[in-house]
Amino acid sequence: MSRELFWLSLTLGATALFVFPYVLNRLVIRGLGGLLANPLPDDKPLAAWAQRAQRAHANAIENLAVFAPAALAVHLLSLGNEGTAMACAAYFLARVLHYVAYTAGIVGVRTLAYLVGWAATAWLIVRALGWV
């Protein structure tokens, strides 16, 4: 397995796990019936941190839609090198930090983590296009 695929796999796993904190909050707030039911307009709202966690999870999925094909392209084109491996590792760490900071409401760290992940993805795209 290439290093790019390794970090992509870890990123996929982390993104899959990001759902659980806010789902557990929904269980606590609304009970098992509320967890299993479709949300209703008059449902009790989730805790503020859980709402942020839900938005952070959605953001992780949105960004994964760009990062994953970029990492796969680098792998399939055999363009992986130290820089692309570091970009994939940086993306993973940035997305975990982004999730934690977003959920905790730490705005500056959240933005910085987002930008690191964006830059890492941009590097992979540039490499896949053969520009570096």
Image (cartoon, rainbow, N blue to C red):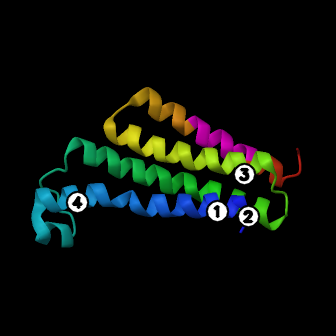
Q: Residues within 10 Å of mark 4 (few under 14, many from 20)?
A: some
Q: Residues within 10 Å of mark 3 (few under 14, many from 20)?
A: many
The kind of residue tagged 2 is Ser
Question: Going by the image, does 55 lie left or right of 5?
Answer: left
Question: Going by the image, does 12 lie left or right of 83?
Answer: left
Mark 4, mark 2: which one is toward the viewer? 2
Q: What is the CA distance from the residue labelled 4 to the residue labelled 2?
A: 35 Å
Q: What is the CA distance from the residue labelled 2 to the residue labelled 1?
A: 6 Å
Residue 107 pos. (x, y %): 40, 29
Disc number for residue 85: 3
Residue 116 pos. (x, y %): 60, 37
Q: Residue at x 73, y 64 (%)?
A: 2
Badge 1 is on which residue? 6
Residues under numbered marks 2 and 3 in contact, where contact means CB atoms less than 8 Å apart: no
Nearer the observer, 20 or 67: 20
The kind of residue tagged 1 is Phe
Query: Which of the two discs, 4 and 2, labels the residue nearer the N terminus?
Result: 2
Nearer the observer, 25 or 61: 25
